[in-house]
């Protein structure tokens, strides 16, 4: 099970997020997610979706349901396709979209982004100050554009830490446990 601590500037609440992927076959999984809002002491998200991966096309599609803190049930549909730009696979161009359908069928998201992975970004030092070449930290930087909101965004990830921000002033930070 993947767990993380999440904090967003707009909610001002620490959330505990958990995700479990259960393989159904070699390219299909059932994804279960839950989130606990520590400020109100209640779940803020529960979801289940089936996700199918197409490794030859560098893509995936998923369908499912989500129940959020506003006591709304949504139907989810999402798709994602990543294309390697460099031969080493560290630079990718990704197109992704998702729709959370309620009765009004109006909540959509879509983005195009470049993702750059930087290997050997920083070598850790041990207590004596000597470089420890066994432990190498990696960094991933994503720069993208959310199409429906017309907003550029950035994501910086270093090992367990992730920072997301956009030009509308929204931000969040995540620590993977």
Image: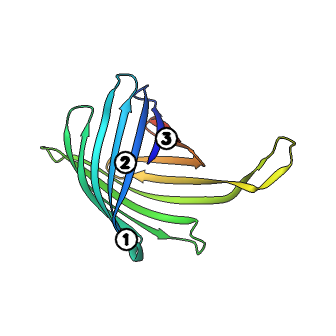
Residue drawn at x 28%, y 45% as measured from the top left:
47
Q: Which mark is residue 26?
A: 1
Local SS, label 3: strand
Q: Does 52 appear above or below 103?
A: below
Query: What residue is shown with label 3?
Result: 165
Please name which of the two marks, 3 or 2, marks the residue nearer to the observer: 3
Residue drawn at x 47%, y 47% as measured from the top left:
153
Q: Quadrant of residue 79?
A: bottom left
Local SS, label 2: loop
Disc 1/disc 3 C-alpha distance (Å): 34 Å
In the image shown, does 5 or 10 lie closer to the viewer?
Answer: 5
Q: Position of residue 12 (x, y in %)?
A: 43, 25
If you read the primary sequence from the N terminus, does the residue marked by circle 1 or circle 3 appear first?
1
Local SS, label 1: loop
Q: Is residue 166 visible?
A: no
If you read the primary sequence from the N terminus, does the residue marked by circle 3 or circle 2 appear first?
2
Please name which of the two marks, 2 or 1, marks the residue nearer to the observer: 1
Disc 3/disc 2 C-alpha distance (Å): 14 Å
Q: Is residue 129 visible?
A: yes
Q: Quadrant of residue 71?
A: top left
The answer to whether the residues at label 3 and label 2 have Cβ atoms under 8 Å apart is: no
Query: What residue is shown with label 2?
Result: 150
Disc 2/disc 1 C-alpha distance (Å): 36 Å
- Say whether residue 64 is left or right of residue 172: left
Residues packed near mark 1 inside 10 Å, few (<14), some (14 to 19) or many (20 plus): few
Residue drawn at x 58%, y 75% as measured from the top left:
87
Q: Does 102 appear above or below 26?
A: above
Residue drawn at x 24%, y 40% as measured from the top left:
67
């Amino acid at each position: 099970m993947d767990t993380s601590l999440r904090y967003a500037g707009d909610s001002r609440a620490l959330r505990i997020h958990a995700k479990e992927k259960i393989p159904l076959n070699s390219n299909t999984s059932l994804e279960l997610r839950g989130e606990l809002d520590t400020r109100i002491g209640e779940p803020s998200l529960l979801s289940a979706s089936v996700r199918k991966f197409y490794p030859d096309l560098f893509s995936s599609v998923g369908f499912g349901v989500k129940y959020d803190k506003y006591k709304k049930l949504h139907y989810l549909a999402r798709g994602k396709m990543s294309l390697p730009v460099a031969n080493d696979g560290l630079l990718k161009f990704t197109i992704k979209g998702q729709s959370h359908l309620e009765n009004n069928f109006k909540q959509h998201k879509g983005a195009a982004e470049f993702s750059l992975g930087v290997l050997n970004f920083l070598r850790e030092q041990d207590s004596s100050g000597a470089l420890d070449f066994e432990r190498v930290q990696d960094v991933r930087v994503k720069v993208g554009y959310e199409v429906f909101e017309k907003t550029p965004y950035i994501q910086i990830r270093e090992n367990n830490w992730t920072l997301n921000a956009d030009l509308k002033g929204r931000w969040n930070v995540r620590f993977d446990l």
